[in-house]
């Protein structure tokens, strides 16, 4: 058996509360690739990302990191190889941005040690790369959504991961910050970081990803190069939206433009998957 | 990424650490001073220098002049052990508060509010009513620890879903648990046939430090010690837990295991405090919050700061309790509640606003 660097899922399924959230997921993420996970709400994007991060164990099948099952990796060694940027980071206590980024060095710092100069250097480089150096002394509870997201990405980069997993990294950001994150991710790719991102932004996937994986109700609909997977017909079938395939007037990249629904169009004839995202939504009981 | 950008925060960090260490050193100095002041004030007030001299002699076991015997007895046999007991209880309660707030990621978690202290009290009442408490000095703290531990895990399992503990759920579970435990405690009290044992239980339950001496210090010290050291070792993990369950897991922390260990440690600390003083509320709420303002939320500084701060806070509260009214002692629990109740409301309203602002 040849061992190669990369993430590999073989026939992975995930079940929660007797509900099959993912099934038959087989995909390879080669080192240096950028995989986009796409699909409507509730398709299982976040769950798939959590399985890849080793935060959830698969109910069936295997998730392999560099040829070894993720669950068999020592947790700290895994954290040096693979970092996760979750969809939401809720922070209750006013840690400073610098402190949060330095926590990314946790898998490198022993229980009896302080962070070394090297740890601080890596954290600062990560902050410079994400344009958060000027926020270093601010309490993270006072940051805007975009600033916090970049601090969280800096924290993940401080882990010096070979694989960076991001769950909707541009979801809460304004246009400028979306573009900044997008260009940051291409920079990281050029530096050899393998990226997996779950996103709703089809055009981001078209511009950034080497491979995309289209999910619907927990199954793979298609996987391959973005331009081959994201055909207007398939987008119509999966997202129930008509799109025109155009080209970006400046970059020349393929660009999908959604067609507005007509008022008398009603909802499409087939039922949409359950709107509630299995993990991403807040627990109802937290509402006062 | 020019070099100037890279080096500036590095300098800031070392300044920060130094500032934090200074704050901590100031806290320790304040604490030691408070102990001396508290030992010198009381029904008979002694000069501070005499108190310190007598304390040093007492601790070092040096001979004491015959004319100072009476004063030495007051300082070393009555007041100082009580001050120590106050310091220990304060440190234990504040630490258990810090740990619970970190692991529930909730600034309102506290041994009193979520019912852990009541659990300890029920354990204590049970062991006193059976008469087992008189047989061994470790029986009472063991019982309060067991009660606190069971309650802590019950609250954890009732209020935490998928690693999240919504504020309202935690507080409501706390109310329910507190009232169940309080009625069970009353039941045991009312069923107790022996008047002397009932009186003993009531005295202990009311929460205070009157009559506490060296035996109480010796009884609880090993428990507090066993709680403090591992908490210090887990301070970094507590920081990581603040980032949320998923992030903590992806950073290589065994979240479930660490949470359970921390929960057990906070119960151990709260249980030890209850064994000495009965239930004293709000210390675990007020002190961690004040210390967070002083040294920041990094647990590596916050934990020692909260321990020292909690000790100082309760030494002063107890001093007020026994000197404010000349002839009578005010219950210590009443004093801390007078400070802590409004403070709790303030924090609650602030959290409400924050959550509404976010949501």
Image: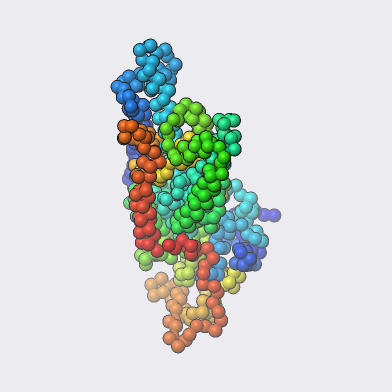
Q: Is residue A15 visible?
A: yes
Q: Is residue B313 visible?
A: no
> Residue A17: image x %, image y %?
61, 64
Task: Identify which residue is drawn at 31% across, 24% down.
Answer: B45
Task: Identify which residue is drawn at 35% across, 55% down.
Answer: B350
Residue nearest the observer in this picture, A176 or B15: B15
Q: In the current view of this chain or complex, which residue is farthest to the bottom? A: A264
* In the image, residue A63 above or below residue B195: below
> Residue A3: image x %, image y %?
65, 53
Residue nearest the observer in this picture, A139 or B154: B154
Colouring chosen for the image of the structure:
rainbow
> Residue B9: image x %, image y %?
35, 44
Residue nearest the observer in this picture, B152 or A30: B152
* Horizontal side, residue B220 vs residue A248: left or right: right
> Which corner quadrant holds the C terminus of chain B?
bottom left
Task: Identify which residue is drawn at 69% across, 54% down.
Answer: A1
Task: Identify which residue is drawn at 65% across, 59% down.
Answer: A62
């Amino acid at each position: 058996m040849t061992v190669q660097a990369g993430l590999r899922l073989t026939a992975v399924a995930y079940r929660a509360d007797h509900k099959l959230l993912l099934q038959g997921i087989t995909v390879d993420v080669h080192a240096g690739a950028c995989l986009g996970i796409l699909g409507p709400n509730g398709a299982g994007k976040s769950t798939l990302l959590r399985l890849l991060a080793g935060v959830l164990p698969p109910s069936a099948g295997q998730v392999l990191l560099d040829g070894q099952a993720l669950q068999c990796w020592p947790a700290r060694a895994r954290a040096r190889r693979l970092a996760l940027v979750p969809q939401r980071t809720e922070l209750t206590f006013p840690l400073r941005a610098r402190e949060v980024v330095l926590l990314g060095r946790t898998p490198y710092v022993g229980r009896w040690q302080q962070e070394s100069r090297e740890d601080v250097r890596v954290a600062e480089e990560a902050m410079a790369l994400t344009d958060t150096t000027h926020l270093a002394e601010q309490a993270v509870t006072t940051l805007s959504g975009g600033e916090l997201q970049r601090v969280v990405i800096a924290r993940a980069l401080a882990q010096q991961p070979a694989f960076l997993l991001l769950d909707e990294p541009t979801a809460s950001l304004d246009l400028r910050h979306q573009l900044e994150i997008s260009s940051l991710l291409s920079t990281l790719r050029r530096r050899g970081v393998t990226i997996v991102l779950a996103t709703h932004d089809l055009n981001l996937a078209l511009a950034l990803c080497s491979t995309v994986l289209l999910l619907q109700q927990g199954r793979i609909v298609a996987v391959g190069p973005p331009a081959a997977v994201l055909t207007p017909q398939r987008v119509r079938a999966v997202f129930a939206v008509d799109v025109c395939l155009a080209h970006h007037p400046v970059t020349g990249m393929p660009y999908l433009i959604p067609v507005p629904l007509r008022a008398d169009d009603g909802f499409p004839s087939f039922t949409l998957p359950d709107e509630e995202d299995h993990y991403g939504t807040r627990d109802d009981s937290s509402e006062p | 990424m020019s070099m100037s950008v890279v080096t500036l925060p590095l300098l800031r960090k070392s300044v920060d650490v130094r500032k934090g260490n200074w704050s901590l050193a100031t806290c320790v100095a304040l604490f030691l001073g408070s102990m001396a002041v508290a030992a010198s004030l009381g029904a008979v007030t002694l000069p501070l220098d005499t108190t310190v001299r007598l304390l040093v002699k007492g601790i070092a076991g040096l001979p004491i002049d015959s004319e100072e015997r009476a004063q030495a007895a007051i300082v070393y046999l009555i007041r100082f052990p009580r001050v120590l007991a106050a310091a220990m209880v304060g440190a234990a309660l504040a630490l258990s508060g810090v740990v619970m707030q970190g692991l529930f990621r909730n600034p309102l978690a506290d041994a009193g509010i979520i019912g852990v202290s009541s659990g300890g009290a029920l354990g204590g009442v049970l062991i006193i009513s059976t008469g087992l408490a008189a047989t061994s000095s470790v029986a009472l703290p063991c019982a309060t620890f067991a009660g606190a531990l069971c309650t802590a895990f019950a609250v954890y399992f009732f209020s935490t879903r998928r690693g999240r503990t919504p504020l309202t759920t935690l507080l409501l579970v706390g109310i329910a648990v507190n009232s169940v435990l309080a009625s069970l405690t009353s039941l045991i009290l009312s069923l107790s046939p022996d008047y002397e044992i009932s009186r003993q239980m009531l005295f202990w339950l009311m929460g205070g430090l009157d009559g506490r001496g060296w035996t109480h210090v010796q009884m609880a010290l090993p428990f507090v010690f066993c709680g403090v050291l591992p908490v210090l070792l887990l301070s970094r993990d507590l920081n990581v837990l603040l980032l949320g369950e998923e992030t903590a897991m992806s950073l290589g922390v065994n979240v479930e295991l660490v949470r359970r260990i921390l929960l057990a440690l906070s119960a151990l600390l709260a249980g030890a405090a209850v064994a000495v003083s009965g239930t004293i509320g709000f210390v675990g709420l007020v002190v961690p919050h004040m210390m967070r303002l002083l040294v920041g939320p990094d647990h590596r500084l916050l934990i020692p700061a909260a321990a020292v701060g909690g000790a100082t806070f309760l030494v002063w509260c107890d001093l007020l309790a026994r000197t404010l009214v000349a002839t009578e002692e005010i219950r210590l629990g009443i004093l801390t509640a007078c400070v802590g109740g409004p403070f709790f409301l303030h924090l609650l309203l602030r959290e409400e606003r924050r959550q509404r602002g976010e949501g």
